[in-house]
Amino acid sequence: MILTGLARPKVNLFLHVTERREDGYHLLESLVCFPDGIGDRITVSEGDALSLFETGPFASQTGCQSQNLIMKAADLLKREFSVGQGAKVLLEKNLPVASGIGGGSADAALTLNLLCDLWKISIEKDHLESLAASLGADVPSCLQSRTAMMRGIGEILSPVETLPAFSILLVNPGVTVSTPAIFKELSIPEDQPAIPERWGEVPNDIFLSLGRCRNDLEPAAFSLVPAIKKVINILKMQDGCRLARMSGSGATCFGLFETLEEARDAQKTVEMQHPSWWSAASMVNADVDA
Ligand code: C5P
């Protein structure tokens, strides 16, 4: 049996940090979305042992295989359910690594789902979610891979069904960013903007609402990686860009647009000016086949 899926990136449309916990983790409020049709492709098939093969533009940057969240997810599931067989996992790494869009977390979440099917494991939803949470703070949201309000350290999720469709351009300047380093550098803001209860019915509503929110990790990220500020400034200058912001702890930033055509035109301009940067234009909430 061969099973495959797309591990879509997680974008934090805003991210407020409210508290630092004693264990060093931070309590957050964040609206996360998963742009359509882009991501890492993972394919699994039967095998005696667990093995991982990597291809794609960012395969050389994923680091040591035993530290890869795909292998950690597979090992965890195998141990939890005393699975005797292994699996061949093929990763086409299309998303930049350590880049604030949860690529590794999305890979881990999809691996859990695919291997449950391959190994015919029947698992309760809560159990799967707790396994996901043990792999990393972003893995539960990637398991759902749908627009949601995220709270706690990332594990409390409320789906947001009513968001209108809009377009997004993701841009990464080719710099990896250490998430712990950014959180360590962060000063938690004293004021917290109110989070809208409803995001509105048309793209303009959500752009205005999001404009009143922030990514609280931006100041720390800008001071550690000045290129991020430059990406945001370039995005802001593009025709039709209604909001430009960093996702997660960076360095990937996004611009929001009403139409996919505007996002694609902006992508062409950014690509021409900075051919070495990674970018992807897509839709959010358009219910295109993921
Ligand atoms: O859980 P994960 O391994 O993805 O988190 C990476 C790092 O990001 C943590 O070690 C922590 O420094 C930071 N983090 C945090 N608060 C969160 C999520 C992540 O401080 N809610």
Image (cartoon, rainbow, N blue to C red):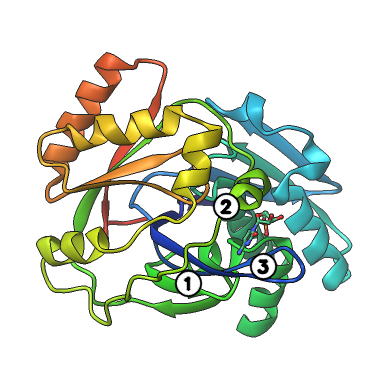
Q: Is residue 257 left or right of residue 225?
A: left
Q: Which mark is residue 186?
A: 2
Indicate the secondary structure of the residue bearing disc 1: strand
- Calculate the distance from the C-alpha at mark 3 to the C-alpha at mark 2: 26 Å
Residue 150's label in the rendered image is: 1
Locate residue 156: give its quadrant: bottom right
Residue 214, given in percent of the width and then of the height, sits at 36, 58
Mark 2 burial class by Cα count in 10 Å: few <14, some 14-19, many 20+: some
**Mark 1 lies within 8 Å of ligand 1 (Cβ measured):** no
Near mark 1 (Cα within 10 A), the count class, few <14, some 14-19 or many ≥20, is many
Q: Residue at x 27, y 15 (%)?
A: 273
Kindly report the distance in space between the C-alpha atoms of the residues bearing marks 2 and 1: 19 Å
Q: Residue at x 56, y 34 (%)?
A: 224
Point out the image quarter for the N terminus. bottom right
| Along the viewing direction, whichever of 51 and 226 lies nearer the viewer | 226
Instruction: Write down the quadrant of residue 98 in the picture.
Output: top right
**Residue 95 visible:** no
Mark 3 secondary-structure assignment:
helix
Task: Tell me the kind of residue under disc 1.
Answer: Met
Three-letter code for the amino acid on which mark 2 is drawn: Leu
> Quick one: SS at disc 2?
loop
Q: Is residue 58 above or below residue 162?
A: above
Location of mark 3 (residue): 132
- The mark that comes first in sequence, 2 or 1, is 1
